[in-house]
Image (cartoon, rainbow, N blue to C red):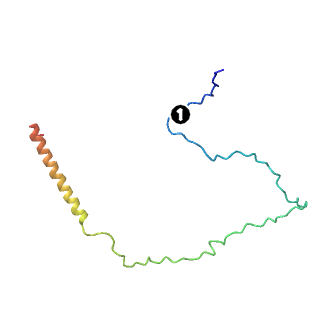
Amino acid sequence: GGETPETPETPEQPEGPTLILTDVPVEEEIVEEETPLAAAPAEEEAVIEDEDTPLAADPETDAAEIEDEDTPLSAVPKTGDESGIFQLMSMISGMALAVLSFIDRKGRHSRFGSRH
C-alpha cells in the first residue's frame, strides 16, 4: 500500500501578467413581476376637434420697415506690434542664407576643381 494518490493536472499558465478577477457579482435570476395596470377607462371615445392651422400675418400688408442706417464708426484701438523686429530678423536670416550658399558653392568648386 505505498501508492500515492493521483493529483489532478493543473492547466498550464500562460506566460506574462495574469489578470485575477475579484468581487465578481454572482448572477441572480430575475423574477419578472406582473406590472400593475390602471383600471380600464369607460368605453367613451375622446373627440378632438380639428382646428384650422394658425397662419402668420400677411407679409405684404403687415411688413415692418427697418431703416438701413449707416454703420456707426468709432476710433478703433491700434493692435499688434509695429516695432519691425520681424522684418529685421527676416532680412538678417535671408542675408545669412545667401552668404552661406555662396561660401558652400565656392567650397565645392575649389574641392572638385570644376567651375559649374
Image quarter of residue 92: bottom left
Instruction: In the rendered view, tell whether residue 56 sits above or below residue 74.
Output: above
- Asked if residue 112 lies left or right of residue 9, the reply is left
- Can you say which quadrant of the picture contains the C terminus? top left
Element on which disc 1 rests? loop
Q: Which of 4/48 is in front?
A: 4
Give the residue drawn at x 27%, y 70%.
82
Q: In the image, residue 11 lies at what x, y percent?
A: 59, 30
Give the residue drawn at x 22%, y 61%.
89
User: Which residue is farthest right?
Assistant: 43
**What residue type is disc 1 on?**
Pro
Q: In the image, residue 98 lies at what x, y percent?
A: 17, 52
- Please tell me how many numbered marks the rendered image carries: 1
Give the residue drawn at x 71%, y 45%.
27
User: Which residue is farthest front?
Assistant: 1
Q: Which of 34/53 is in front?
A: 34
Instruction: In the rendered view, tell whether residue 38 sits above or below residue 70.
Output: above
Q: Which of 100/55 is in front?
A: 100
Instruction: In the rendered view, tell whether residue 18 sits above or below residue 73.
Output: above
Q: Which of 48/70 is in front?
A: 48
Q: Which residue is mark 1?
A: 14
Give the residue drawn at x 20%, y 59%.
91
- Can you say which quadrant of the picture contains the N terminus? top right
- Asked if residue 38 lies left or right of residue 63, the reply is right
Image quarter of residue 29: top right
Image quarter of residue 63: bottom right
- Asked if residue 93 lies left or right of residue 55, the reply is left
Q: In the image, residue 54 lies at what x, y percent?
A: 71, 69
